[in-house]
Each structure stands twice: as structure tokens, then as C-alpha cells.
Amino acid sequence: MVHRPLKKSLRPLPALHDDWLERIGAALKNKKLDKSRFCREVLCEIAYPQFVAHYETAVLDPKLPIGTRLALSALDPHHITLEPEYYADVDDEKFQRVKPLLWLWYSFDRLAAGGQNVELGVRFRRLLAPHIFKKCGENFKAFQNVEFSYGYNIDCGDDVVVHRHVLLDDRGGIKIGNKVSISDYANIYSHTHSIVDQKDVTNATTVLEDGVRITYHATVFAGVKVGLDSMVGAMAVATKDVRPHHVNVGIPAKSVRVKPNAPSTTPDRLSTSHERGEKS
Ligand SMILES: CC(C)(COP(=O)(O)OP(=O)(O)OC[C@H]1O[C@@H](n2cnc3c(N)ncnc32)[C@H](O)[C@@H]1OP(=O)(O)O)[C@@H](O)C(=O)NCCC(=O)NCCS
């Protein structure tokens, strides 16, 4: 394989980016910020600038097409519903606190200024994440179309990268260590349903320890601990814990190797009964 690190610098981008992000960052520092109004105003400015000055009257204006009024109304998080609001176990107080910023995050991803506009998007989400997660470390990087359940149940270390279209279902909590990478279209779950009664839900914290890599389209089930510096291969389904430094692939994911840089004390592959396919 060829070592191909990311480029350190890009073509210069318009100063507008810095100015806009500075304004967002300053607003978020205000502990008394009305987050719903903030979300609405930020979205209105970039999606429907012609309505910024008279948003409230426009939403009620019968002369405007009803679809336009609906679109304007939906900029206000009070007027939309997110799926977790249906869950019986949601902490409504916590969720209502983060909902405006989740809505801003998701809505930004659907606009021309947002979505695949990588540099702006990564810096924007880095500003939002600490106000949504339970804890967010330094240098957090999220690409477009990441989705959460509650958001407030994520405990995230430093230098974490979350790629596009990842689902972080933090219903039972997700603990992410330092230098963790979660690749495109991966799903990390922390809740599960009984096979008898779908309404019987078990929440269990899922843990991704330091240095873990969850690769493309992989799924990690609720309550699984993915051990230090281990890897879950493309399309794998991790139904059980992944041991430190192991590479687990397939459905259900099993160890195919220990990483060559693992400490010499790391136990070999196929040393658990689960991995040998034995019934417990
Ligand atoms: C995890 C991964 C890197 C493992 O690669 P590796 O250690 O070089 O493993 P190998 O290619 O030697 O494969 C070992 C065995 O597992 C199988 N295997 C490898 N990846 C697999 C996968 N994702 N699903 C099922 N089986 C897989 C191989 O066919 C091979 O089987 P065999 O021994 O019967 O021939 C690779 O599976 C993977 O998922 N790559 C995704 C892309 C990537 O690199 N992502 C990382 C950053 S985003």
C-alpha cells in the first residue's frame, strides 16, 4: 500500500467563511442564547434571505403560496418533529435543549452552503457538537449527513472523525475514545428491541475505545465494546465485543487477524468460543 496522507492546505476560501463561522461561534458562547430563534435565523439567512426582515409576518401571510409558508415555518425547530420525540425513554428536557442545534445541523446539510461543502461544514459542525454532545473533545471532524438519536448521550474524545452518512444512535449512550474513525455509512447502535415485543427496548452503552476504526458500512450493536486500536471491517456486523488490536470482519464479525503493530501480549485470533463458532 502507498502512504497517502491528506493534503495539509487547500486553495484559499473566501473570507466570508471565517466571518460567518466567527459569528456562529460567538452566538453559541452566549449562555442565554435562544437556540430555536438562532437556528431559525441562521437557516433563514442562508435558505430564504428575502424573508429575513419579515419572517414572522411571512409565515402568516395568506398571499404567499402555502408551500412557501410551510418551508419557512419549518426553519423554526418548534414547528418540526424529530423521531426521538416519539421515544418513551427520551429525556425531554435534555432533548429540547439540543433539538434546535440538531435541526440546524441536519438542515444545513441540505443547503447549497452546507452538505458536501467540506471545509465550511466540518468547521461549522465542530462549533455545534460541544453544545449537543455530553462531551466533545478537541479537533472533532464530522462530514455531511451524520445522524444522531438524542445527541446528548454522546461522550466523544479528541481527534475523532465521523464520515458521511453515519448513524450514531446514542439512545443508550455512545462512548467514543480518542483518535477513533467511523467510516461512511457505518451504524453505531445503543438500543435494541425484544424479538417478542418490539416495544420492549433495551438501551446499552456502546463503547469505541481509543484508536478504533469502524470501516465502511459496518454496524456495531448496542452494548458492544470495540477494544483499543481494533478494527471492524467493511460491511461487518459487530454483535459481540471486539478485542483490543484485533481486526474483525463478516456477519457476525469475527477476528481474522491481530494487527501487526499490536503488543506481543495480544491474544491470537479465534481464541473466543464465539469466534470459533461454538455454542455457549
Ligand atoms: C478490515 C480490513 C482492512 C481487513 O483487511 P486485512 O487485514 O488486509 O485482511 P485480509 O484482506 O488479509 O483478509 C483476511 C480474510 O478476511 C476476509 N475479509 C477481509 N475483509 C473482509 C470483510 N470486510 N468482510 C468479510 N471478509 C473479509 C478476506 O477475504 C480473508 O479471508 P481468507 O483468509 O478466507 O482469504 C478490510 O476487511 C476492510 O474492511 N477494509 C475496508 C476498507 C478500509 O481499509 N477501511 C479502513 C479505513 S476507512
Image (cartoon, helix red, strand yellow):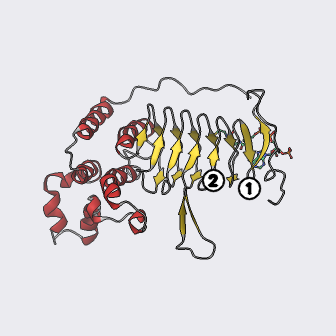
Looking at the image, the residue that sits furthest to the top is 8
Residue at 22% of width from left, 41% of height from top?
A: 31
Q: Secondary structure at mark 1?
A: loop
Residue at 58% of width from left, 43% of height from top?
A: 208
Q: Is residue 246 above or below residue 87?
A: above
Residue wearing tag 1:
252
**Left or right of residue 274, residue 99 in this image:** left
* Mark 1 surroundings within 10 Å by alpha-carbon count, few (fewer than 14), some (14 through 19), many (20 or more): some
Where in the figure is residue 192, as x and y percent of width and height?
57, 63
Looking at the image, the residue that sits furthest to the bottom is 196
Q: Is residue 232 above or below residue 77?
A: above
Where in the figure is residue 135, as x and y percent of width and height?
42, 41
Q: Quadrant of residue 136?
A: top left
Q: Is mark 2 within 8 Å of ligand 1?
A: no
Residue at 47% of width from left, 37% of height from top?
A: 141
* Mark 2 surroundings within 10 Å by alpha-carbon count, few (fewer than 14), some (14 through 19), many (20 or more): many
Where in the figure is residue 280, as x and y percent of width and height?
79, 59
Three-letter residue code for mark 1: Pro
Residue at 55% of width from left, 33% of height from top?
A: 179
**Left or right of residue 220, residue 93 in this image:** left
Looking at the image, the residue that sits furthest to the front is 280
Where in the figure is residue 220, as x and y percent of width and height?
62, 52
Dividing the image into four quarters, tell me where ligand 1 lies. Answer: top right
How many numbered discs sit on the rendered protein?
2
- Estimate the spatial distance between the alpha carbons at disc 1 and disc 2, rounded to whole Å: 10 Å
Q: Is residue 96 above or below residue 70?
A: above
Three-letter residue code for mark 2: Thr
Sequence-wise first label, 1 or 2 = 2
Question: Can you tell which mark lies on residue 219?
Answer: 2
